[in-house]
Structure formats: C-alpha cells, structure tokens
Amino acid sequence: MTRSRAQEDGTPGELTSHYYAQRASMGLIITEGTQPSDDGQGYLRSPGIYTEKHIEGWKKVTDAVHEEGGFIFIQLMHVGRVSHPDNTPHHRQPVAPSAIAPGVEMFTAKGMQEIPVPRELSEENIQTTIADFRKAAAAAIKAGADGVEIHGANGYLINQFIGENSNMVIS
C-alpha cells in the first residue's frame, strides 16, 4: 500500500520510521512499494532504494522496526507504464514492455493527468532494469532490511510483460 510519505527525492523520512515502528509488533512488516530506479517511480512521494540517501533513510526505518522487535522486508516495485513524467525525478515518459498507454489518469502535483504512452523497453533496457532490481535488493540489505519482496502483480512492470492489454508480443 503506497503511503506517499517519502521526501520529494524518495528518501524515507521520520514519518516513515514512525509509521513502520508503530506496526512492528505484528512481527514481519512488508513495506510499501519502493522503486528500484528513477524509471520505477509512479506516485508522488513514494520511496526509492537506489541512492545512498535512500539507504540512509531506510536504515532509520529498519532500525526503528528492529528496536520494536519486528522484522522488515522492503518491497521492490517498478510501476512500468503506470506513471506520469511529472511524478519522476527525470521527467521522462514511463517505460513498459510495449508502447501501450493504460488509458487512465494519475494524480500529479498539477492534479489528475492522463498517463501518456510509455517508452517501449529495448532488450538492453530490460537488462538495465534487471540490474536495477539487483542493486536495489543489495541496497535494501545494506539498509538493514531482513529481506526483500519483489512486487510482480497488480498491473505493474513485471505483470505488464504477461498482460494482453500491456504487451503487444502477447496480444
């Protein structure tokens, strides 16, 4: 569940630490979707785990959860085509297996806007994205997470590769 409590650059802040620490007594916490790269961001103020600053922010979160006796997995989520350039740090079009827009609007700082047609990932781009997930998983462990979960459902990037409505190769 996206909380949208990160700082503008995707760094988890004190509110994030407090939020997850409050829930640590449940035993195992699986975080909100956390983007592995700039291209993986879809929503405003969603957290990342691909810069040193992100790692430092998540370290405070994992420490807070561990202090309360809990365990925490950071969920890695790349939204693929479910994004808008206004919601990403680089302001590029979203990426996807095929250049097929989802046909919905997304909340941005300027209000609701139609999600544009995404850039189709090349084979090289796919390899880069896989490497981004590896780097993000290592960063999550460096930040003190007990593990990672890769979000592969609900119409986000991994699911887009097998969706008839999002991948021309399958259609």
Image (spheres, rainbow, N blue to C red):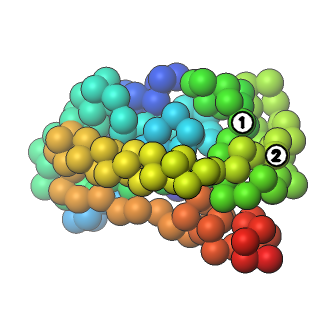
Question: What secondary structure is marked by label 1?
Answer: loop
- Residue 2 in sight from this viewpoint: no
Q: Position of residue 89 (x, y in %)?
A: 57, 24
Q: Residues within 10 Å of mark 1 (few under 14, many from 20)?
A: many
- Which quadrant would residue 53 be assigned to in this image? top left
Amino acid tagged 2: Val
Q: Is residue 47 above or below residue 68?
A: above
Q: Position of residue 6 (x, y in %)?
A: 46, 31
Q: Residues within 10 Å of mark 2 (few under 14, many from 20)?
A: many
Q: Nearer the viewer, residue 21 or 115?
A: 115
Q: Is residue 111 above or below residue 116?
A: above
92 displayed left or right of 89: right
Residue 117: numbered disc: 2
* C-alpha separation, residue under disc 2 versus residue under disc 1: 8 Å
Tag 2 and tag 1, C-beta contact below 8 Å: yes
Q: Earlier in the sequence, mark 2 or mark 1?
A: 1
Q: Position of residue 160 (x, y in %)?
A: 65, 65
106 displayed left or right of 142: right
